[in-house]
Image (cartoon, grey):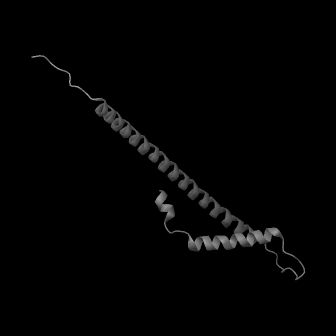
């Protein structure tokens, strides 16, 4: 009994090649998607860190502003200094931030 090699027609071999190539492309897409998702998580983590530092900075500015307040209020014609305006805005921002920030965001990171 002689062994015959099975005949592979060109369409079947082309089909198998396309299926294999499709599987490779699918695996590469999954890997790239995972990389993008990891980068997005890292960016979100950095944004959270920046918000923590910004919150601390605003709190510091608000504390400094409370020490620098003058005893006498400015007259009607006198324009307040820009530092005073910045400190007032920072204090207002910090108050709003404390009121509206998501609760428990510090515990999620740890």
Task: Give residue 10's position: percent from left, percent from top.
Answer: 31, 29
Residue at figure coordinates x 61%, y 57% from the top left = 50
Check the image and name the residue furthest to the bottom: 76
Task: Give residue 24's position: percent from left, percent from top.
Answer: 38, 37
Residue at figure coordinates x 43%, y 44% from the top left = 29
Quadrant in which residue 18 is drawn: top left
Task: Give residue 67's position: percent from left, percent from top.
Answer: 76, 70
Quadrant that contains the N terminus: top left
On screen, 36 above or below 93?
above
Check the image and name the residue furthest to the top: 2
Task: Give residue 12's position: percent from left, percent from top.
Answer: 28, 33
Quadrant in which residue 69 is drawn: bottom right
Q: Is residue 2 left or right of residue 49?
A: left
Check the image and name the residue furthest to the right: 77
Quadrant in which residue 90 is drawn: bottom right
Looking at the picture, tell me which residue is in the foreground, 105 or 20: 20
On screen, 94 above or below 18?
below
Looking at the picture, tell me which residue is in the foreground, 77 or 107: 77
Looking at the picture, tell me which residue is in the foreground, 18 or 10: 10
Residue at figure coordinates x 76%, y 69% from the top left = 86
Number of numbered markers: 0
Check the image and name the residue furthest to the left: 1
Residue at figure coordinates x 61%, y 70% from the top left = 97
């Amino acid at each position: 009994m002689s062994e015959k090699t099975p005949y592979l027609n060109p369409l079947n071999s082309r089909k198998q090649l396309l299926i294999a190539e499709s599987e490779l492309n699918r695996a590469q897409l999954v890997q790239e998607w995972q990389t993008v998702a990891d980068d997005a998580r890292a960016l979100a983590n950095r944004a959270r860190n920046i918000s923590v530092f910004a919150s601390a900075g605003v709190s510091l500015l608000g504390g400094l502003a409370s020490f620098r307040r003058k005893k006498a209020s400015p007259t009607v014609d006198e324009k307040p200094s820009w530092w005073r305006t910045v400190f007032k805005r920072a204090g207002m921002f910090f108050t709003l931030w404390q009121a509206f920030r998501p609760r428990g965001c510090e515990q999620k990171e740890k």
